[in-house]
Image (cartoon, grey):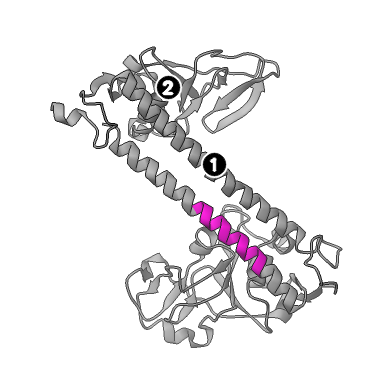
Amino acid sequence: MAEQAKVPAIRFAGFTDPWEQRKFSDIVNVCSGKDYKHLEEGPIPVYGTGGFMTSVDEALSYDRDAVGIGRKGTIDKPYLLKAPFWTVDTLFYAIPKSDMDLEFVHCSFLNVDWKSKDESTGLPSLSKEAINETIALVPSFNEQSRLGDFFYNLDNLITLHQRKYDKLVIFKKSMLEKMFPKDGESVPEIRFAGFTDPWEQRKFGDCFEFLKSNTLSRAGLNDENGTARNVHYGDILIKFGDCLDGERSDLPFITDDTVLPKFAGSILREGDVIFADTAEDEAAGKCVELRKLPKEPTISGLHTIPARPRFFFGTGYLGHYLNSDAYHRQLLPLMQGIKVISVSKAALQDTQVRFPGLSEQAAIGAALSEIDNLITLHQRKLELLQNIKKSLLDKMFV
């Protein structure tokens, strides 16, 4: 390798020496985890490939920090281990040698494509030999320390935003539980000042009429152009929140222009709701309320149940209510299937819909939508920081 190739694209001022090529066996001692079930409960954390598991009364490493890397299962998610600790037998722990900075070593592990070193035909697995033979490029200890400190601080910033995001998600879940009436109750636990009337309860069929949906797979959609847009069930399950602003979301186009005329009576409007009728778990029945829509006509797609309110609901109310446990738990005993779970129109018809007056609906929708906006803001900040870290790992290491 040419000397000029042994320096990173971005470097701290004052460092000019080329990086040295070394094997991982020269920079860490890879140690094996062990079973912990014979140990007593205690203060020492036990870690597996997924993170913390339990606490015991003994440690494999009492005073040496390390990098954990999976031996079986998840082999591409290395993370820091602070002594004292114990690791299970599916998690190696790599202790840096005396001339190596822990944080730098952690970043070096993050920069390796460990999946490419998978030695199994089934459950992913990694051997000590594969780790030890992996090549790393290493600078002086001082430069390692500068890099390690930099990424340590960046990780702390990412963790801070992750915690803010997690707290908001938990806060919203709590509000959803308290802002809708529990079973047997006529009013919710938390209510905006000035609202005192009992909530109304009606059958789903009295509140909504069903619309038609198409059966187009992803192959019949595109992101470039078309005369109509499509709402796919996979996007409802994974991509969309409780409410969808179609003007700002990249709803796919329908490739075949002859599809739209068949659904002339089921073109979606603002205020309509769409359920995903199929999922691999109890997420079946997840719903999205349509806010604004794109200029092109939009129809509901494969494995969806579109429904139109028979009377007006406050903006944002239905999206949040129909996704709350207060409503969704009605669907659980009505779900069918083993590997794939589904919800039918008939199942929806059997549910009860609860709602207050329009003003209170609007207040609930606005409050929960504001929480959604905060969650989205912190999610975007978190994703931005994670992308920055990924880019810097690429440019600040060789």
191 vs 54: above or below: below
Please state which of residues 288 and 217 is positioned toward the viewer in this rendering.
Answer: 288
Q: Amino acid at mark 2?
A: Leu
Q: Is 129 on the left or on the right of 22, as rendered?
A: right
Q: Is residue 231 above or below residue 122?
A: below
Question: What span is in magenta?
Answer: 366-379
Per the image, label 2 sits on a secondary structure element best described as helix
Quarter of the figure with residue 349: bottom right
| Image location of residue 190, percent across then percent down | 79, 61
Q: Can residue 3 be seen by looking at this rendering?
A: yes
- Around disc 1, counting alpha carbons within 10 Å, would you say few (fewer than 14), some (14 to 19), or many (20 or more)? few
Q: Quadrant of the C terminus?
A: top left
Confirm or deny contact between disc 1 and disc 2 (CB under 8 A). Answer: no
Q: Position of residue 128 (x, y in %)?
A: 39, 19
The residue that mark 2 highlights is: 102
Q: Give me the residue at 30% from left, 35% from top.
A: 396
- Label 1, on which residue? 160
Residue at the far left: name it: 2
- Do we see residue 347 in this rendering? no
